[in-house]
Amino acid sequence: MTITGIQLVTDGGWAVGGTQTVLVDNVMINNTTFTFEADNKEACKDGGWQDFTSSPGPFKNQGDCVSFFANGG
């Protein structure tokens, strides 16, 4: 069967006026691992470089992001 969604439940710390960020990586479903990493420099374009708030980013600008992936990380 095709997986159409995954839900994560976190605590309610955000409800007191803060924000909450959940980073998900290296999810294994059956025998397949999904890394959710951008595997090419296309993910850096159109402001995408700003989405890398944690590893492998953050990046200073789009060129910094493109260079990272162009050089194989």
Image (tube, rainbow, N blue to C red):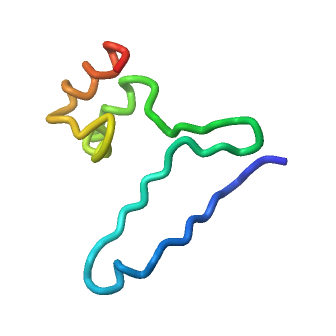
Tally of numbered tags: 0
Q: Which residue is found at the position 26% from the left and 83% from the top?
A: 17
30, above or below 70, in the image: below
37, above or below 54, in the image: above
Q: Residue furthest top?
A: 71
Question: In x, y percent, where is residue 49?
Answer: 27, 37
Q: Quadrant of residue 34?
A: top right
Q: Which residue is found at the position 64% from the left and 37% from the top?
A: 33
Question: In x, y percent, where is residue 16?
Answer: 29, 86
Q: Which residue is found at the position 26% from the left and 77% from the top?
A: 18
Question: In x, y percent, where is residue 64?
Answer: 19, 26
* Quadrant holding the C terminus: top left
Q: Residue furthest bottom?
A: 16
Q: Quadrant of residue 58?
A: top left
Q: Which residue is found at the position 42% from the left and 60% from the top?
A: 22
Q: Is 33 on the left or on the right of 68, as rendered?
A: right
Question: In x, y percent, where is residue 39?
Answer: 46, 26
73, above or below 51, in the image: above
15, above or below 47, in the image: below
Q: Residue furthest right?
A: 1
Q: Quadrant of residue 38?
A: top left
